[in-house]
Amino acid sequence: MFKIQIKNASQNLSYEHFEGKLFGGRAPSGVGNALIIKDPSVSRTHFCIEAGVGDNFLLSNISSGNFILFEDGKTLAPGTSAEFSTPNHFTIGSTSIFIQFGSNGNPEDFFNKENKDTTVFNSPKRPEKLKPPSVPTINFEFPSNSKFLDAQSHPVNFDNQNASSAIGKILKSLEKINQLQAELSVGEAYNNQIARQLVEIADLDIGMVLLLMNDQWVISGCHTANENISVQYSTTLVKNVVARRKTFYQDLSNLDEKGQSLLNIEAAVISPILDVSGNIIGALYGARSRNIISKGGITSLDAQLVQMLANTVGAGIVHDRALKSKAQFEQFFSPELANELDRNPDLLSGREQEITVMFSDLRGFTALSNILKPADICMLLQDIMEHLSEQIQLQGGVIVDYAGDGILAMWNAPIQQPDHVERACKAALVMLDGFPAVCQRWSHLLGDFPIGLGIGVNTGIALVGNTGSKRKFKYGPMGLTVNLASRLESSTKILGIPIVISAATQAKLPPHYPTRRLGLARFPGVALPIDIFEFNHSLSDNEWHENKIIYEKALNYFETKSYGNAIKTLAPLIEKHGQGQLVDNPSLKLIRKCLEEMESSSGEFSNVLWSMTK
């Protein structure tokens, strides 16, 4: 058995081969096992591995033009086979492969070794200890006649006998570039099209899309004029061109006079790929190689067309990043807010800010989930959450998180909203008002099973920012303000009231919004008791307004220790309950509290009406 470790920009794969032949490549074919290597610089069927004598393995290079390079400097030419000892390490294209015999050891450990040697010309991701044979280390200098495109590109001269040919070339190239710009994508398949067009524009032997990822150059697209061309590029040439931030096009054959060599490159064109801020994110690399196809120098027209291709790649990457960023924002923010954040991401920086926080939770949903099928529960919950989320975003709220059947949302961050309190309370009203209609759509599942909605709202200072991680974005608030909003939502169960708000929120609401003071409440984790209020979801409920006046009058009697008057004041509400109307839980609680104080012999009085234990 052989243990094999494959490592490149796209793979870090362990493989065990027991017997027979093992064919490796991008799309390997042959009688035996297949090992797919996701590397555009590797041939379709590049090599074959089979058992040799003892612990050795027999390696065959099936590619038509690419050498296999070994750590000790040995090479295996195309169309040849040789036997090698294990453990061993070789490189094909941009992929490193380590092989060992038997089950002892871990091939991955090889890649954890410290590599100190460097090379001048690499295929990307090749281990630094691997050095191609007969490649001298050089101090590269551009010839004095090197050509770069300036900010103002050179005009094309049509006043000669080649004018019609040049015009035809421009039109044909622009047609292809326009097609690529219309598709505007990212990824290997798209970048292979870019590389192909690069080869065709300048009549090159090889074209590549190189992307700079974690300070390393990675081949993201590649096209060669024929199968005999080896996929490799000069990192030194790329780095020098990128340092100048200009498109380079040059006949490099005269470098031999200075004893310099560029891996048989006769001519090259390299154009930096920039992001929206002008940062280098990659490069288009094209070359003609000596002793393969010699076609003369690269013209200014070629370079300008290549530069347009590089701009197309950059636009695709920027567009992809923008879409991902906006899609990420729109999961949590309204479209208007997502657009604002897309223009100014600094708004997401962590800071202290006054915000209004809302927690909502479904009542009876846990019990319902034990009755219905999981698929039905998921569809029902999705419809309810869609309704609630839509109302939050219509009022400019930020959906911070979903937790089971609950939602955490906030207002006044990341952008300031002077009316954030009113927005949050409006959202709570429309969430509650539209809830019965959603339930009605699912009456065939719900039947007579009651489910409800509880909402808590609080206003105060909180720390807002990315409370997630680098792996998962989560913009939201932290602190006592958030904790209290959660406690208020939980209190709706005890109070029998759908929307409960804090005194801080009620104080900043416009006066025309109907609220009822419920009294002082003590919450776990909150040092002092706070006033809590019912927020009425019906602005035209005359009976509610009458009951509010009665209750608040009785509450005032209680807090001044006039218990008998408090009970007398609440009597009409209790009578309504006796006549079949729904009981008002706060009124019953206030009567019980008055009776307890009248019966108490301790003499101690606490005006805290509500003690919320959770």
Image: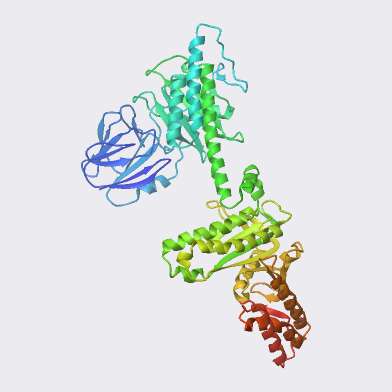
**Rendering coords of residue 332 (x, y %):** 58, 53
Relative to 181, 32 lies left or right: left
**Rendering coords of residue 338 (x, y %):** 61, 47
Location of the C terminus by quadrant is bottom right
Above or below residue 598? Residue 23 is: above
- The structure residue drawn at horizontal position 63% and vertical position 60%, both measured from the top left corner, is 430
Q: Quadrant of residue 63?
A: top left
- Would you say residue 138 is visible in this rendering? no
**Rendering coords of residue 177 (x, y %):** 50, 26
Q: Nearer the viewer, residue 192 or 508?
A: 508
- The structure residue drawn at horizontal position 43% and vertical position 67%, both measured from the top left corner, is 372
- The structure residue drawn at horizontal position 54% and vertical position 22%, both measured from the top left corner, is 248
All told, the count of numbered labels is 0
Q: Nearer the viewer, residue 366 or 134?
A: 366
Above or below residue 146? Residue 91 is: below
Relative to 259, 144 lies left or right: right
